[in-house]
Image (cartoon, rainbow, N blue to C red):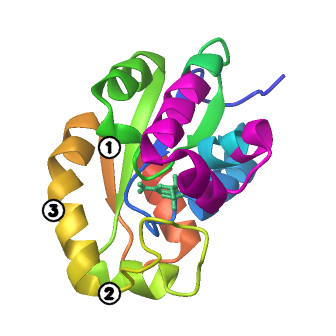
């Protein structure tokens, strides 16, 4: 049983490359809380990679998997949940998350984001769009949703994982 300071879940949201997974694992050690990652849970359950899921079943199927994953997590507490970057696209997901924890938004500029994601082939949305123009446009489209969901916002540009994580904890 976790003896953490926090009785609620900590949900990390933000655009691809915002640092959700790395911050999640750092916080998990720091706070002695279990971490889960919605993308990883989906990959395990479906037995396919995220690019494969997008390719074979399409994005809306993947979005259904995300909603189902959140529902499956609803009985668990004291988790650090690293959410897929598109989790805020469905309002029902945001409503669900708001009831179950504190939502931490990590942000980064399009330039920082590109640096962090450019070598990855695991993000179908960026596969043919690895440039700051596309990233900036998609960020603009999603910005309002991220901001509306967030309880706490932490900028991540030019900061270490430790700095970002400590800032998150200070604001929780
Ligand atoms: C997505 C973000 C990805 C993953 C999928 C779609 C998105 O997660 O869920 O490729 O639409 O922003 P990360 O934010 O962990 O890269």
Label 2 environment density (alpha carbons within 10 Å; few <14, some 14–19, many ≥20): some
133 horizontally vs 125: left or right: left
* Residue holding disc 1: 152
Q: Earlier in the sequence, mark 3 or mark 1?
A: 3
* Residue holding disc 2: 131
Q: Picture coordinates of residue 139 (x, y %)?
A: 23, 63
Q: Residue at x 47, y 76 (%)?
A: 127
**Quarter of the image where one finds residue 78:** top right
* Closer to the eye: label 2 or 3: 2
Q: Earlier in the sequence, mark 2 or mark 3?
A: 2
**Quarter of the image where one finds residue 167:** bottom left
Q: Residue at x 43, y 39 (%)?
A: 60
Q: Picture coordinates of residue 85 (x, y %)?
A: 43, 53
* The N terminus sits in image quarter: top right
Q: CA distance from mark 2 to mark 3?
A: 14 Å
* Residue holding disc 3: 140
Residue 32 visible in rendering: no
The boundaries of the magenta stretch are: 43-70
Q: Secondary structure at mark 3?
A: helix
56 horizontally vs 111: left or right: right
Viewer-proximal residue among 42 and 162: 42
Q: Earlier in the sequence, mark 1 or mark 2?
A: 2
Identify whether 125 is placed above or below 41. below
**Quarter of the image where one finds residue 96:** top left
Question: Which secondary structure dominates the residues rendered in magenta?
Answer: helix
Residue 98 visible in rendering: yes
Q: CA distance from mark 3 to mark 1?
A: 19 Å
Q: Residue at x 56, y 70 (%)?
A: 161
Q: Secondary structure at mark 2?
A: loop
Residue 132 part of the magenta-drawn span: no
Identify whether 11 is placed above or below 155. above
């Amino acid at each position: 049983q976790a003896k953490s300071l926090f009785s609620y879940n900590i949900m990390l949201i933000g655009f691809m490359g915002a640092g959700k997974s790395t911050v999640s694992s750092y916080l998990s050690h720091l706070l002695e809380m279990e971490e889960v990652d919605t993308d990883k849970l989906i990959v395990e359950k479906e037995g396919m990679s995220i690019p494969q899921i997008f390719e074979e079943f399409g994005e809306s199927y993947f979005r259904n998997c995300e909603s189902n994953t959140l529902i499956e997590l609803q009985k668990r507490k004291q988790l650090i949940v690293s959410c897929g970057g598109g989790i805020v696209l469905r309002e029902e997901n945001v409503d669900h998350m708001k009831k179950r924890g504190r939502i931490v938004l990590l942000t980064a500029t399009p330039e920082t984001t590109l640096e962090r994601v450019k070598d990855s082939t695991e993000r179908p949305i960026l596969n043919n769009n690895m440039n700051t123009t596309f990233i900036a446009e998609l960020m603009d489209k999603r910005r309002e949703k991220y901001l509306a969901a967030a309880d706490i916002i932490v900028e991540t540009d030019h900061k270490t994982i430790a700095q970002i994580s400590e800032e998150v904890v200070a604001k929780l």
